[in-house]
Amino acid sequence: MRVRVMFFGGLKEIVGASEDAPEIPPHSTLATLFESYCQRFETLRPRRPSILFARNGEFATPETALADNDEVAFLPPVSGGAGRESVGRSAEDRLSELAIDDPAGHVFRITRRPIDSQSLARTLQRDQDGAVVVFEGVVRDNTKGRPTSHLEYECYEALAIGQMARIGREIAATFPIGRIAIVHRLGRLQIGEASVAVVASAPHRRPAFEAALEGINRLKREVPIWKREFFADGAVWVEGEWDERLLTGFSAHAQP
């Protein structure tokens, strides 16, 4: 049988490709498939404890069995549900943006267009809200003093949009807020441009601040988005770490 395998972040450089379509034996699992790549690319093996697996757009354990035409993703640590494209948009917009229509009025979006945080704030604000907190993460001109020319972001979109919605809905259920928006931009970003926005509206200021902070903190540890920093003398993928609950829940430390 044949599967589609996708590599992200620094893993692409190790294997020399962003995708592969290997033929695998019957009864293969995610763990045995990953092991086959470790045998070809030895530098993969030491990274195994920090890599998560996904099958068909969902996190999966190493023991998950594979079937013909499955989509597999190997996910390195990130830098730091079911979605559908919004209706009523142009064809160009649909290619540039993936969004979830949320009945509660929350906004979850992955876009290749500039982020308009003030428009998000107006969309979220209700008459009963006395506070709207807007957090923007912007591209700075250096990393630890090393001049940065620009950044590039990529993500595993099929999984990322659902993770963003799950995080936002959990935050809305935890804090006394009205609505929340989580938006991340992909592609090439210049110095000063916003890469991410988290907006929270609430009747009172404290929960709005707390919800926005929780949103950005969880986004950076739970959503498969990777950042590449470009300098005058080269570029590097920036990796942080997965949330411990994901590593534990999906047996990231299990060996094949």
Image: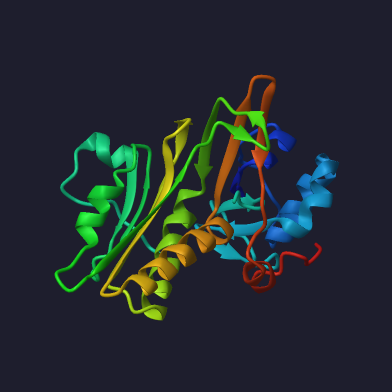
- The image quarter containing residue 147 is top right
- The image quarter containing residue 70 is bottom right
Position of 252 compared to 97: left or right? right
Q: Residue at x 50, y 37 (%)?
A: 139
Q: Tell me, yes or no, if residue 212 can be seen here.
A: yes
Position of 54 compared to 46: left or right? left
Task: Give the farthest residue toward the top.
Answer: 232
**Residue 31 in the image: x percent, y percent?**
73, 60
**Residue 184 in the image: x percent, y percent?**
42, 48
- The image quarter containing residue 111 is top left
Instruction: State whether residue 125 is above or below residue 148.
Output: below
Instruction: State whether residue 156 is above or below residue 180.
Output: above
Q: Residue at x 23, y 49 (%)?
A: 119
Q: Tell me, yes or no, if residue 166 can be seen here.
A: no
**Residue 106 in the image: x percent, y percent?**
29, 64
Which quadrant, please, contains the C terminus? Answer: bottom right
